[in-house]
Image (cartoon, rainbow, N blue to C red):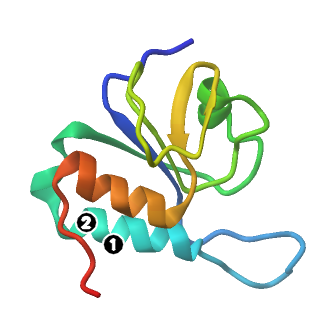
Amino acid sequence: MPVLERDTVFLIKPDFEDPAWPNQRFYCWHCALIDGVLGSFPDLLGALDIRHINWSRPRNDVIALLGEDHQSLPVMILKSGATSSLQTGTANGQAFIDDKDGILHALSERHGFPVPHP
């Protein structure tokens, strides 16, 4: 299994099509929210690995780390050996957070991003 040296965030590339909804283009709003926060603080990205992948399944890059049952995005996979009170699960020995609010909280707690204004 690959070793992650940094917390890794997987996001869906925007502007995709879903065959269930013909003639429409989409973005994942949870991914867009997280991507916007990441892009707003480029100086804080050094300890993160950000990967934008296609919407369609199978999502092989995620499967390689978490297995086929955990392809939902967005997801932050913690660096190998790390754990967090924010993690929502573990798979293949990797702790992960697959909740948008948890990911945003982890960006603040683990990587020094500002917190959202109440």
Query: Which part of the image, by quadrant, shows the C terminus?
Result: bottom left
Q: Pointers 1 and 2 in contact (CB under 8 A)?
A: yes
Q: Amino acid at mark 2?
A: Gly
Quadrant of the image occupied by residue 33: bottom left
Q: Amino acid at mark 1?
A: Gly
Crowding at label 2, few (<14), some or many (≥20) Cα neighbours within 10 Å? few
Residue 44, label in figure:
none
Name the element at disc 1: helix
Q: Residue furthest top?
A: 1
The residue to which callout 1 is attached is: 36
Query: Which part of the image, by quadrant, shows the N terminus?
Result: top right
Residue 5, percent across and down? 32, 22
Task: From the viewer's side, name the closer residue of 2 and 103.
Answer: 103
Q: Is residue 118 above or below residue 63?
A: below
Residue at 41% in and 21% down: 80
- How far is disc 1 from disc 2 in space, using C-alphas? 5 Å
Q: Is residue 5 above or below residue 42?
A: above
Residue at 77% in and 47% down: 57
Residue 108, percent across and down? 25, 58
Q: Is residue 104 above or below residue 53?
A: below
Quadrant of the image occupied by residue 28: bottom right
Residue 39, label in figure:
2
Task: Please give left or right for residue 116 compared with residue 77 in the image.
Answer: left
Task: From the viewer's side, name the closer residue of 100 and 28.
Answer: 100
Task: Please give left or right for residue 27 compared with residue 4 in the image.
Answer: right
Name the element at disc 2: helix
Q: Is residue 4 above or below residue 74?
A: above
Crowding at label 1, few (<14), some or many (≥20) Cα neighbours within 10 Å? few
Residue at 73% in and 53% down: 56
Residue 69, percent across and down? 79, 38
Residue 18, percent across and down? 79, 70
